[in-house]
Amino acid sequence: MIKACIFDLDGVIVDTAKYHFIAWKRLAAEFGYELTEAQNEKLKGVSRMGSLELLLEWAGVKKTEEEKFEMTERKNIWYRALIKEMDSSEILEGVMPFLENLKENKISFALGSASKNSNTILEQVGLSDCFEAVVDGNKTTRSKPDPQTFELGAEALHLKSEECIVFEDSQKGIEAALRGGFYAVGIGEEEVLSKAHLVIPNFIGLTFENIVEKLS
Ligand code: B16
Ligand code: MG
């Protein structure tokens, strides 16, 4: 029986990928590399350091561990300046009614994100007190596709993985959910997220009951 939902943040609740893109692009320009939107897609759900490592690999640039740390810190300062301008209008369409529907039906829900900035983002958009548990990059030691993020989420809700639905927009996140034994619902395009149990474009017009029906 499905008793709870675990939501990824970037790409599911809000679209912060556009801000990550601006900040990574600025960093890449420093070593003469132009990051494309298609490459930015590949950074979705990837940790901050993992993203830098991919970027350096694409650019064919080598850096020391110290330099890499400094670069991620700088990128994060630029990124934080951008997210500090966010407000509730950036919550993706359909999300608020879906969360209201969960509350009405007394269905627990948690956040499961790779971001170490999730608390700031939740505060900016007015969702700080909304989730029963928040598992983010500050609480995990293993990145998606490892299921740790969602396992900690289920644990915080005192539930088993097979009792929870994970909503994710990235392939790595879907893989993490499947590896952990969760129901995996992809938010986005079927071709990209085909491994998920179900793919929906967004939450517009959907209820918890609709999703459970589609999964059974
Ligand atoms: P930060 P999610 C992920 O968020 C983003 O999709 C990914 O692009 C980012 O690199 C990662 O968080 C780490 O973010 O630099 O804020 O710690 O999709 O897992 O909610
Ligand atoms: Mg995401």
Image: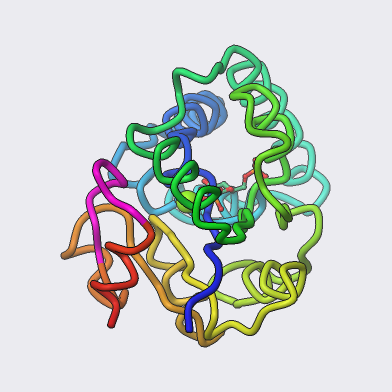
The magenta stretch spans which residues?
A: 199-207
Name the chief secondary structure element in magenta: loop
Which residue is at the front of the view, 162 or 207? 207
Question: What x and y, as percent, mark residue 130?
Answer: 66, 40
- Residue at 45% over, 18% down: 89
Q: Is residue 180 visible?
A: yes
* Residue 201 among those drawn in magenta: yes
Question: What x and y, as percent, mark residue 167?
Answer: 44, 60
In the picture, measured across the screen, residue 73 lies left or right of residue 6, that is right
Scheme of image coloration: rainbow
In the picture, measured across the screen, residue 92 lies left or right of residue 112, that is left
In the picture, measured across the screen, residue 91 lies left or right of residue 81, that is left
- Residue at 52% over, 63% down: 5
Question: What x and y, as percent, mark residue 29?
Answer: 49, 26
- Residue at 55% over, 49% down: 103
Q: Is residue 60 visible?
A: no
Give the number of callouts: 0
- Residue at 41% over, 39% down: 95
* Residue 121 among those drawn in magenta: no
For the C terminus, which image quadrant? bottom left
- Is 129 placed above or below 107 here? above
Which residue is at the front of the view, 33 or 11? 11
Question: What x and y, as percent, mark residue 140?
Answer: 76, 64
Q: Residue furthest left?
A: 191
